[in-house]
Image: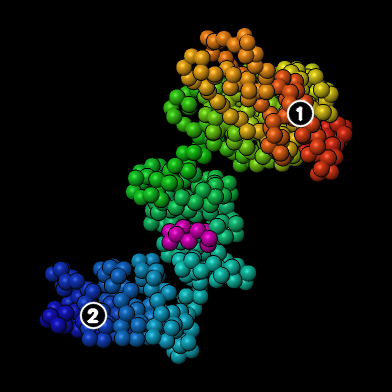
């Protein structure tokens, strides 16, 4: 051992603070262990020199605090072993090296378990136990011990007490990254406790989330909901929590993620206010600035849905045009898309309906949680008002085949229900026949359609022909169904839908019953 090592251990054992300070000024590293595995910090605790331990605790690294001796005892184990009721030193070790609390000795005991065993040994042991019991919630929060926190809460133990740094268990659970503990505590402490600021930096719970980069959206929002004052409280540098986060946003992935979450939530709130107020120009500015307008509020409503709900047709038209196809299909918490909103809320906005249905045709037949599609809603609610009737007439004209429109209302609903239930199976195939002149392309197409070919008057067609909806297969037999007109095809599709419904013993509800369901189930 180097002579300085011997001097350092001797000074710690003797409690010679002057010598310890001289060694520190000379650049001595305090992580040297003797043959028993003890560091100078450990020896100052063992021999009861509080002033030396208090000086060294600010000089050694967390790794040094976590060092163990031959019994696998760390600095906290030694405080428990020798009954040192030094609250400040215990707390500083826990703050700098929380791992010390859960390290176990050769007998499998943590420092607190060792103290529990020795608590009646001396006045010092009993006093240390009392000190730690007073700080039990803090210790459990630091360790992330949710079970212990719950036990303390059940026993009526106060969960909002501050330590000497002014920090509450909620703050410590945030500092040490224990999301489950923070989530539990946020619902147990009062708004006043949530707004508490520590003594060192004037940081509240939100400041600490910003400081340590905790991207916990739910906890941030619950703090803001319970104690909105936290958002505007300033630290010793005059910074709000969001100011502090802005400064640290590039520090880690957690900081960047939290900033992204808050930016998104802010834009959601900002866009919501602009849409509700009908400020089209500001909505356009948000879009120009690159902010996402697809974000959803707590009930899953997008900016487009809110524009429809609050009768902002110009904003709805703008959003329908600029929102990509993938975002048009977003549903709220009740599985309703934007077309459901148009159908339910008496919005005969034909241009908006057309844009959305063309961008994403499947929206027309998508069921919500009440098993209703936008098309079914339009049909059932057509008699509710003149506006409903106007939308119904537009939809019937533009979104259904002509021969379906000629059917009665119940048959149309059966058809739409069959589409949603997949009673028919559509397989679209595009075929192109290319070849030299007079090789028989037209004859091949006629053969596929089962048409007669007059070999006597056969000649070159010299034209590109386009045939639509000319083939229909029975999906059970895979045989082509006769009849090639559009009317034949639609009627055959209806036949298959009807057969499927009968096979499943499905019953079509009366119109009045469906309207009643709609009235009870579509409150926005």
Q: Nearer the viewer, residue 124 or 63?
A: 63
Residue interval drawn in magenta? 173-182
Image side of residue 20 versus residue 57, left or right: left
Residue drawn at the location 28% of the way across and 77% of the way down: 41
Q: Nearer the viewer, residue 84 or 389?
A: 389
Q: Gap between marks 1 and 2, in whole Å?
A: 90 Å
Image side of residue 476 versus residue 319, left or right: right
User: Splitting the image into 4 quarters, where does residue 3 fall?
Assistant: bottom left
**Labels 1 and 2: the sequence-earlier one:** 2
Could you tell me how many numbered marks the image carries?
Answer: 2
Q: Position of residue 376 (x, y in %)?
A: 76, 30
The figure's colour scheme reads rainbow
Q: Nearer the viewer, mark 1 or mark 2?
A: 1
- Residue that badge 1 annotates: 492
Q: Residues within 10 Å of mark 2 (few under 14, many from 20)?
A: some
Q: Is residue 445 above or below residue 302?
A: above
Q: Position of residue 377 (x, y in %)?
A: 76, 30
Q: Which mark is residue 33?
A: 2
């Amino acid at each position: 051992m180097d002579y300085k090592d011997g001097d350092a251990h001797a000074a710690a054992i003797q409690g010679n603070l002057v010598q310890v300070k001289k060694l520190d000024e000379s650049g001595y590293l305090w992580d040297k262990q003797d043959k028993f595995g003890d560091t100078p910090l450990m020896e100052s605790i063992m021999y009861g020199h509080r002033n030396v331990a208090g000086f060294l605790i600010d000089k050694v690294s967390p790794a040094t605090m976590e060092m163990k001796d031959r019994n696998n005892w760390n600095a906290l184990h030694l405080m428990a072993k020798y009954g040192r009721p030094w609250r400040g030193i215990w707390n500083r070790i826990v703050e700098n090296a929380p791992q010390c609390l859960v390290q176990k000795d050769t007998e499998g005991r943590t420092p607190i378990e060792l103290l529990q065993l020795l608590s009646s040994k001396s006045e010092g042991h009993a006093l240390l136990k009392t000190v730690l019991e007073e700080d039990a919630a803090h210790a459990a929060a630091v360790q992330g011990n949710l079970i212990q926190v719950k036990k303390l809460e059940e026993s009526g133990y106060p969960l909002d007490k501050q330590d000497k740094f002014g920090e509450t268990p909620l703050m410590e659970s945030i500092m040490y990254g224990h999301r489950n503990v923070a989530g539990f505590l946020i619902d147990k402490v009062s708004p006043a406790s949530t707004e508490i600021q520590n003594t060192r930096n004037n940081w509240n719970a939100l400041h600490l989330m910003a400081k340590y980069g905790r991207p916990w959206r739910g906890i941030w929002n619950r703090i803001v909901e319970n104690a909105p004052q936290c958002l505007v409280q300033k630290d010793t540098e005059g910074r709000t929590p969001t100011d502090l986060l802005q400064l640290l946003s590039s520090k880690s992935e957690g900081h960047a993620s939290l900033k992204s979450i808050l930016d998104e939530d802010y834009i959601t709130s900002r866009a919501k206010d602009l849409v509700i107020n009908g400020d089209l120009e500001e909505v356009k500015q948000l879009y120009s600035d690159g902010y996402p307008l697809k974000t959803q509020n707590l009930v899953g409503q997008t900016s487009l849905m809110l524009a429809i709900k609050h009768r902002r047709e110009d904003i709805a038209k703008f959003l329908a045009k600029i929102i990509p196809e993938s975002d048009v299909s977003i549903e709220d918490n009740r599985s309703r898309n934007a077309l459901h909103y148009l159908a339910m809320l008496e919005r005969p906005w034909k241009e908006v309906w057309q844009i959305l249905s063309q961008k994403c045709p499947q929206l027309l037949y998508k069921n919500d949680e009440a098993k209703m599609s936008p098309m079914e809603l339009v049909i059932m609610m057509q008699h509710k008002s003149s506006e409903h009737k106007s939308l119904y007439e537009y939809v019937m004209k533009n979104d259904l085949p002509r021969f379906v429109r000629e059917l009665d209302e119940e048959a149309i609903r059966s058809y739409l229900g069959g589409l949603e239930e997949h009673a028919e199976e559509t397989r679209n195939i595009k075929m192109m026949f290319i070849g030299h002149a007079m090789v028989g392309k037209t004859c091949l197409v006629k053969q596929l359609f089962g048409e007669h070919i007059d070999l006597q008057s056969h000649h070159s067609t010299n034209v590109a022909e386009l045939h639509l909806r000319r083939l229909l297969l029975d999906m059970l037999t895979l045989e082509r169904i006769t009849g090639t007109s559009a009317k034949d095809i639609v009627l055959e599709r209806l036949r298959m839908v009807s057969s499927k419904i009968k096979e499943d013993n499905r019953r079509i509800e009366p119109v009045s019953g469906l309207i009643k369901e709609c009235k009870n189930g579509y409150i926005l």
